[in-house]
Image (cartoon, rainbow, N blue to C red):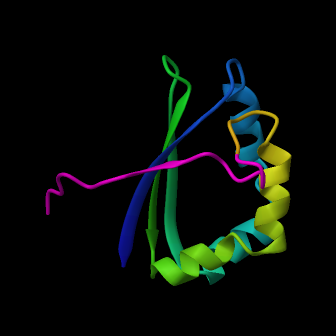
Amino acid sequence: MIQKAFKMKLFEGKEEEYKKRHNEIWPDLVKELKSHGTSKYLIFYDKDTNILFSYIEMENEELWDEIAETDACKKWWAFMKDIMETNPDNSPISVELSNVFNLK
């Protein structure tokens, strides 16, 4: 299992809309995430900076990378682009974070 963490940024005042959309996440997107080896996906929000912190547990990097090529993921990115910072392909601008501590 691989653990991955990254941060993204919401536009000002979009926290509630972000929560709403994720509370209504599309079943086909959930299916793609799970079928591509994602076993845990948590997202936290810092209201002072509008930063989202995501933590994911997955089988491997290759499966994770394949999710970006699915129709469900591409449609989700397009759906979310109006409330967060995105790249030209609508994917969220994200910064991968390195693990500096792990209490076992």
Bounds of the magenta span?
87-104
Residue 12 is left or right of residue 4, and the answer is right
Q: Is residue 27 visible?
A: no
| Depicted 70 relative to depicted 79: above or below | below
| Depicted 19 relative to depicted 4: above or below | above
Quadrant of image for the C terminus: bottom left
Residue 24 is left or right of residue 99, and the answer is right
For this rendering, which residue is in front, 90 or 102? 90
Residue at the spot x=70%, y=68% of the render? 30
For this rendering, which residue is in front, 74 or 42? 74
In the image, residue 27 lies at what x, y percent? Answer: 79, 66
Q: Quadrant of residue 69?
A: bottom right
Residue at the spot x=76%, y=55% of the render? 25
Q: Is residue 52 visible?
A: yes
Q: Main secondary structure of the magenta part?
A: loop
Based on the picture, tell me whether residue 101 belongs to the magenta stretch. Answer: yes
Based on the picture, tell me whether residue 67 belongs to the magenta stretch. Answer: no
For this rendering, which residue is in front, 39 or 90? 90
In the image, residue 58 lies at what x, y percent? Answer: 46, 74
| Depicted 18 relative to depicted 78: above or below | above
Residue 49 is left or right of residue 4, and the answer is right
For this rendering, which residue is in front, 32 or 81? 81
Residue at the spot x=56%, y=25% of the render? 50
Q: Quadrant of residue 72?
A: bottom right
In the image, residue 21 lies at what x, y percent? Answer: 77, 43
Residue 24 is left or right of residue 38, and the answer is right
In the image, residue 57 lies at what x, y percent? Answer: 43, 68
Residue at the spot x=77%, y=49% of the render? 88
